[in-house]
C-alpha cells in the first residue's frame, strides 16, 4: 500500500492493531500507534475500543482505564462497546461489584446497556454462583425494554442446571420457546446435564426427543450425558441402546463414552460384556487409557475373577499405566479375605517380577 503511494487509513491501522494486540505483539502495536501520530491519522472510537478490549482480556484493567481516560481527553466519547469490555474484564476476575458499577454507570454516560451488556454481567454472576442475582438481572432486562436472546436464556438455564434448580430451569426453557427463540445445542446440553445429574433421567430422555423432533441433531456430548446418566442409575440396557445408536447416527464414541459404558456394565455385574467392549475399542481406533484398564480390572475384581484381573493388570503395567485408588481399594479388600489372599499375593508377586 505504501509502495503505491496510498497512505494507510484509520481502518487499516485499526485492523493491524487488533491483530497484533490479540497475539500479544505490543511492540508492534506501539510502533503502529506512533506511525499513526506521524501520519496525522487520528484514532477513532473503534481503535480506542480495540486497545481497551485487548488490555481487558489480559486482565490489565488499570491500563485499560488509563486508555479510556486518554480517549476522552482526545475528544472521543466511550460507547457501549467500551463499557462492555471493562465489565467483561471485571467479570473474568470475579469482581462482580465493580462489574455492576460499570454497568450502572452506562446510563449516566449517555449510553444504554445492550443485550450484550446484560449477557456479560449475567455470565459473570453465574460463574460466581450468584444465581439469584443472575435471575433478577435477567428479568430486569425485560423491564428495561431489552429483549433477552438465546445467549441470555442459555446462560441462566446453565446456571440453574448446575445448582439443581430444575423446576425453574424447565420453566425458563418453556418461556424461551414460547417467546419464539429456538434452543441451540448448548441449551440442550445444560438441560440434559442438570436433569441427569439430579436423577431425572427419563425427563432428560424426553428433552432429548424434543431436541431430535425440532430438527437439531444431537452430537456425541448429548449422547455422553444420557449414557452416563442411565449408567449411573443402573439402567444399562437403555445406555447400551443409546451407545449402539451412535454409529447409525454417524457419531463415533470417544474414550470417555467407552469408559462410561464399561463402568456401567461392570457395576451391572456384566464384566464379560464390559471386557468385549474394552477390546472393541482398539478395533474402533479408540485407544484405551488408564481409566479403561482400571475399570476392567475393578470389574473383574468385584466379581472375584482373579485370573482375568491378573491378565489385564499385566497388560496395563506394560502399557505404563498404574492402578488408581478404586482398583487399589478393591485389591486391599480382597487381600483381607482368606479365600482370595493366596491368589492375590501371587498376582502381585508376578507383577513385581515383570
Image: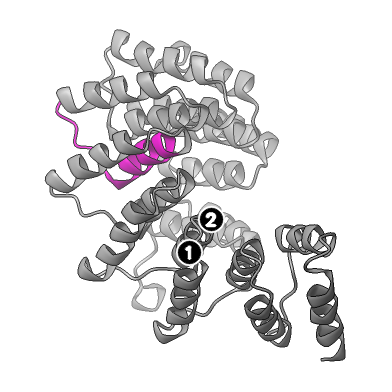
Residue 349 lies within the magenta run? no
| Residue 295 visible within the image | yes
Front residue of 18/231: it is: 231
Q: Which residues are magenta?
A: 180-196
Give the CA separation, mark 1 to mark 2. Answer: 7 Å
* Residue in view at x 39 percent, y 62 percent: 8
Q: Which residue position is annotated with label 1?
A: 270
Q: Which residue position is annotated with label 2?
A: 267
Query: Is residue 102 shown above or below 159?
Result: above
Front residue of 82/177: it is: 177
Q: Position of residue 176 (x, y in %)?
A: 23, 26
* Residue in view at x 14 percent, y 28 percent: 180
Quadrant in the picture for residue 200: top left
Tell which residue pokes out farthest to the top in this image. 143
Query: Is residue 44 shown above or below 31?
Result: above
| Image mark for residue 341 | none
Q: Quadrant of the N terminus?
A: bottom left
Dominant secondary structure of the magenta stretch? helix
Check disc 1 and report its element: helix, strand or loop.
loop
Q: Position of residue 286 (x, y in %)?
A: 46, 78
Check disc 2 and report its element: helix, strand or loop.
helix
Query: Is residue 152 shown above or below 242?
Result: above
Amino acid at each position: 500500500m505504501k509502495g503505491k503511494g496510498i497512505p494507510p487509513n484509520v481502518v487499516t491501522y485499526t485492523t493491524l492493531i487488533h491483530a497484533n494486540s490479540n497475539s500479544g505483539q505490543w511492540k508492534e502495536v506501539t510502533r503502529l500507534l506512533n506511525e499513526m501520530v506521524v501520519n496525522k491519522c487520528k484514532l477513532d472510537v473503534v481503535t480506542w475500543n480495540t486497545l481497551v478490549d485487548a488490555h481487558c482480556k489480559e486482565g490489565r484493567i488499570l491500563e485499560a482505564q488509563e486508555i479510556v481516560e486518554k480517549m476522552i481527553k482526545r475528544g472521543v466519547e466511550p460507547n457501549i462497546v467500551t463499557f462492555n469490555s471493562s465489565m467483561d474484564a471485571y467479570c473474568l476476575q470475579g469482581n462482580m461489584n465493580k462489574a455492576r458499577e460499570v454497568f450502572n454507570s452506562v446510563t449516566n454516560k449517555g449510553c444504554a446497556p445492550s443485550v450484550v451488556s446484560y449477557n456479560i454481567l449475567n455470565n459473570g454472576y453465574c460463574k460466581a454462583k450468584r444465581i439469584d442475582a443472575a435471575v433478577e438481572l435477567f428479568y430486569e432486562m425485560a423491564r428495561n425494554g431489552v429483549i433477552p436472546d438465546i445467549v441470555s436464556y442459555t446462560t441462566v438455564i446453565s446456571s440453574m442446571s448446575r445448582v439443581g434448580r430444575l423446576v425453574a430451569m424447565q420453566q425458563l426453557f418453556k418461556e424461551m420457546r414460547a417467546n419464539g427463540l429456538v434452543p441451540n445445542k448448548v441449551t440442550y446440553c445444560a438441560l440434559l446435564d442438570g436433569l441427569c445429574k439430579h436423577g431425572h433421567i427419563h425427563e432428560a430422555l424426553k428433552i432429548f426427543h424434543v431436541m431430535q423432533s425440532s430438527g437439531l441433531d444431537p452430537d456425541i456430548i448429548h449422547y455422553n450425558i444420557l449414557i452416563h446418566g442411565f449408567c449411573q442409575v443402573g439402567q444399562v440396557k437403555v445406555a447400551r441402546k443409546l451407545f449402539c445408536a451412535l454409529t447409525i447416527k454417524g457419531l463415533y464414541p470417544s474414550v470417555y463414552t467407552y469408559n462410561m459404558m464399561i463402568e456401567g456394565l461392570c457395576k451391572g455385574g456384566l464384566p464379560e460384556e464390559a471386557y468385549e467392549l474394552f477390546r472393541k475399542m482398539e478395533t474402533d481406533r479408540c485407544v484405551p487409557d488408564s481409566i479403561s484398564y482400571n475399570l476392567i480390572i475393578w470389574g473383574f475384581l468385584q466379581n472375584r475373577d482373579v485370573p482375568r484381573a491378573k491378565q489385564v493388570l499385566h497388560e496395563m503395567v506394560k502399557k505404563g499405566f498404574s492402578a488408581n485408588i478404586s482398583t487399589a481399594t478393591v485389591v486391599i479388600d480382597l487381600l483381607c479375605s482368606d479365600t482370595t489372599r493366596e491368589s492375590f499375593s501371587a498376582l502381585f508377586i508376578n507383577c513385581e517380577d515383570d
